[in-house]
Image (tube, rainbow, N blue to C red):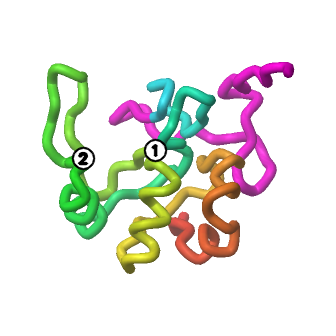
């Protein structure tokens, strides 16, 4: 069985089938910590959804046991504030959607494999403006 190589940032596609855009470099995000929401087989959480986080989502994910607001200097993590762009696990975004608190998404920066978890129509309904 052949192993499919992980696409590089400039080879990856977004959910619209176009080249994947960067999500954020300030704060630096992504499974590879290169600013893009691409993934590979080691990323069990599938960090492929580029979100514009808001206070509702930050409170929600903190209540789920993943505090994204508090800085963790030991890991170089500044803590997120509303308006920051961040690569979120596809399943966590879907849970937030099902619970009525999904953050807006940047379709151009969500990796195509996100569609294995979240339908495009659902993502499009929550696309960030601008």
Tell me the residue at 55%/39% (across/down). Answer: 37
Residue matched to label 2: 68
Tell me the residue at 73%/34% (across/down). Answer: 12
Q: Which disc is residue 14 wearing?
A: none
Q: Which disc is residue 87 wearing?
A: 1
- Residue closest to the eye, 1 or 31: 1
Asked if residue 6 is among those painted magenta in the image, a careful observer would answer: yes
The kind of secondary structure the magenta stretch mainly shows is: loop
Residue 24: % across, % down? 45, 39
The correct choice, above or below, for 41 with respect to 69 in the image is above
The correct choice, above or below, for 54 with respect to 47 in the image is below
Judged from this view, the residue extending furthest toward the right is: 1
Question: What SS does tag 2 mark?
Answer: loop
Tell me the residue at 41%/48% (across/down). Answer: 85
Please state if 116 lies on the left or on the right of 69 as rendered: right
Q: Which part of the image, by quadrant, shows the C terminus?
A: bottom right
The magenta span reads 1-29
Residue 46: % across, % down? 54, 42
- Residue closest to the eye, 76 or 65: 65
- Residue closest to the eye, 47 or 27: 47
Decide which of tag 1 and tag 2 comes sooner along the chain: 2
Residue 51: % across, % down? 45, 55
Tell me the residue at 60%/47% (across/down). Answer: 109
């Amino acid at each position: 069985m052949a192993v499919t190589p992980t696409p590089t940032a400039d080879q990856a596609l977004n959910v619209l089938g176009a080249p994947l855009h960067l999500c954020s470099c300030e704060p630096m995000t992504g499974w590879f910590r290169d600013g893009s929401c691409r993934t590979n087989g080691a990323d069990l959480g599938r960090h492929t959804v580029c979100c514009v986080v808001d206070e509702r989502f930050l409170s929600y994910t903190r209540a789920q046991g993943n505090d994204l607001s508090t800085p963790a200097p030991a890991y170089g993590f500044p803590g997120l504030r509303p308006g920051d762009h961040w690569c979120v696990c596809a399943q966590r975004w879907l849970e937030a959607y099902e619970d009525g608190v999904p953050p807006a998404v940047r379709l151009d920066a969500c990796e195509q494999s996100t569609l294995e978890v979240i339908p495009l129509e659902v993502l499009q309904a929550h696309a960030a403006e601008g």
